[in-house]
Amino acid sequence: MTIALERPGGTTNPAALVAPEVTERLTRRITTDHPEIDAATARRIVGQAAAFIAASGRQPGRNLVPSELVDYGWHAFILHTVDYAAFCQRVAGRFVHHVPTDKGEQEPGSAASARERTTRAIQAAGYTVDADLWRSAAECNQCHAGCHDSPKSG
């Protein structure tokens, strides 16, 4: 008898969560939007964005935050709405919302502590953290002060 696990126990490569054709679409989007990023790095970003989304979906309300580079991957994924919605349903059982925070809405604490909380959540979910892609917290222009995963209540 063979049992296939969606996410094997232990630490796994999160890039395996994303279908190869979707990874290539997202890689092209990242390298087009950010020409300073090469294709190999963009593929790593896609994997870390997948891990971020999966961890966020399993821990709603924790306000996990992507790094600057991982945010590029998250934004690219969101633009591909059909792929993104299907991915969220498969890895989290629900849609993982992207909720920008405005100035003054940020939780107290440093960007470093938010990044640390997020990478711990990714590791707790069983995924490898690519530390080189988690050096700085996201401060994306579209999001004013940062991007978080959990919807605002109301």
Image: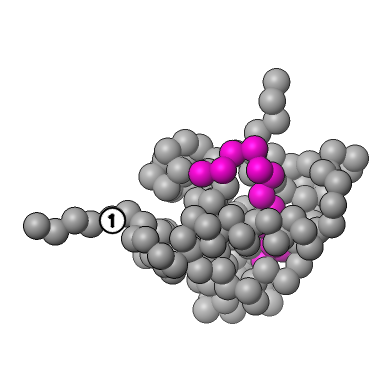
Q: Residue furthest top?
A: 154
Give 116 or 69, whichever is nearer the viewer: 116
Residue that appears at 77% across and 50% down: 146
Figure quadrant of residue 41: bottom right
Q: Position of residue 21 (x, y in %)?
A: 37, 62
Residue that appears at 76% across and 67% down: 136
Q: Is residue 44 visible?
A: yes
Q: Main secondary structure of the magenta part?
A: loop
Give 75 or 94, whichever is nearer the viewer: 94
Q: Amino acid at mark 1?
A: Leu
Figure quadrant of residue 131: bottom right
The part of the chain drawn in magenta is 58-69
- Against 9, residue 96 (above or below) is above
* Left-right relation of 114 to 5: right
* Residue that label 1 marks: 5
* Left-right relation of 14 to 41: left
Judging from the image, the colouring scheme is one colour
* Left-right relation of 5 to 134: left
Question: Of helix, strand and loop, which one carries label 1?
Answer: loop
Q: Residue furthest right?
A: 104
Q: How many marks?
A: 1
- The quadrant of the picture occupied by the N terminus is bottom left
Q: Position of residue 147 (x, y in %)?
A: 72, 48
Residue that appears at 34% across and 60% down: 8
* Left-right relation of 79 to 21: right
Assess whether residue 37 is covered by the magenta stretch.
no
- Against 131, residue 2 (above or below) is above
Q: Is residue 27 visible?
A: no
